Amino acid sequence: MSRAQTTLRTTVSIEGVGLHSGHPVRATFRPAPPETGLLFVRMDHKETPIPALLPSASTFDYATTLSADGVSIGTVEHLLSAAAGEGLDNCVVEIEGPEVPILDGSALPFVRLFHAAGFERQDAPVRPLSLGREILFERGDRSIRYSPGGEGLTITYEIDFPHPLVGKQKLTWAVRPEEYAAQIAPARTFGFLAEVEALRARGLARGGSLQNAVVLDDQGILSGPLRFRDEFVRHKVLDLLGDLSLLGRPLRGRIHARKAGHAMHVEFARALSAALAAPAAEQGEPDSAARRQGARP
Ligand SMILES: [Zn+2]
């Protein structure tokens, strides 16, 4: 009961500032044939397309970057989440600069753009990945666990920030393209004023503003009302979905993350990818689908 691979019906583009450079940048999304995946092309390095796959990824605590042969594109995570959340499998993304525009700090502007283009079902099925056994990844009190089961992917995320407006938040969300736009995509990235100032001191976050993040100081929120009472944990689900999409195919099973971030998401995805590539006997219970599919390099 797998769905068909999906691309966009027409080419669409969007413009905004880069989070770190502060410069205007345009992103153009073009339809692509089945099995293309998401492929980034930097217009000043057209000869080096960058696939949105784990081997291209490098991360920082606050962002995910993709590179190939020394060419890199930064701040890809919300765009990747929008594509994964909406079930957009194949697309060429042309970027006129070194980073994806930050827009409003959420995935919603990308989702609106995809809806404006329309989706085209393609003559090839999606082949989801699944593993027959549990994988637990721990770093102190931070963890991510995969367990098998279910028809799709269900994400549970827990955060605990020592701030009166954040605190402990927990959300379980079964990934459904028809709900992503309303439930997850609008949740904005967030940061603490002190962190933003530290990034600025390093020449980063020049395009960061109260218009593209929820910014908190010790007392409260500087950037206006929240979009959800639990916007913070919803954004963590958004980020995790984008980072997991670097597996190259949709994942089936259950993920439970506690106090993780981009670097840990991607490390976990690498561990999962290695387990998927292992011989079937090491993957736990017999799983003919996983055996047949293996994992992408
Ligand atoms: Zn984010």
Image (cartoon, grey):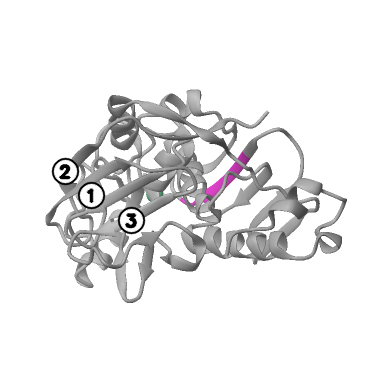
Q: Name the N-terminal-most of marks 1 and 2.
A: 2
Indicate yes or no: mark 2 CB to ligand 1 under 8 Å.
no
Image quadrant holding the C terminus, namely bottom right
Mark 1 residue type: Pro
Q: Quadrant of the N terminus?
A: top right
- In the depicted view, which residue is nearer to us: 21 or 128? 128
Q: Is residue 80 left or right of residue 26?
A: right
The residue wearing badge 2 is 15
Asked where in the image residue 164 lies, by quadrant, the reply is top left
Left or right: residue 279 compared with residue 162: right
The residue shown at (52%, 33%) is 123
How far apart marks 3 and 2 lie (CA) works out to: 16 Å
In the picture, measured across the screen, residue 140 lies left or right of residue 66, that is right
Instruction: Name the secondary structure under disc 2.
Output: strand
Q: Residue at x 51, y 42 (%)?
A: 237
Q: Label for residue 40?
A: 3
Can residue 92 be seen? yes
Instruction: Give the residues in magenta.
Output: 155-162
Kind of residue at disc 2: Glu
Of callouts 3 and 2, which one flags the residue occurring earlier in the amino acid sequence? 2
Distance in Å between CA atoms under marks 1 and 2: 7 Å
Measured from the top left, where is residue 240 in percent x and y? 51, 49
| Residue 101: image tag | 1
Q: Are marks 1 and 2 in contact (CB under 8 Å)?
A: yes
Judge depth for marks 3 and 2 and give the one in front: 3
User: Of marks 3 and 1, which one's residue comes earlier in the chain?
Assistant: 3
The image's mark for residue 56 is none
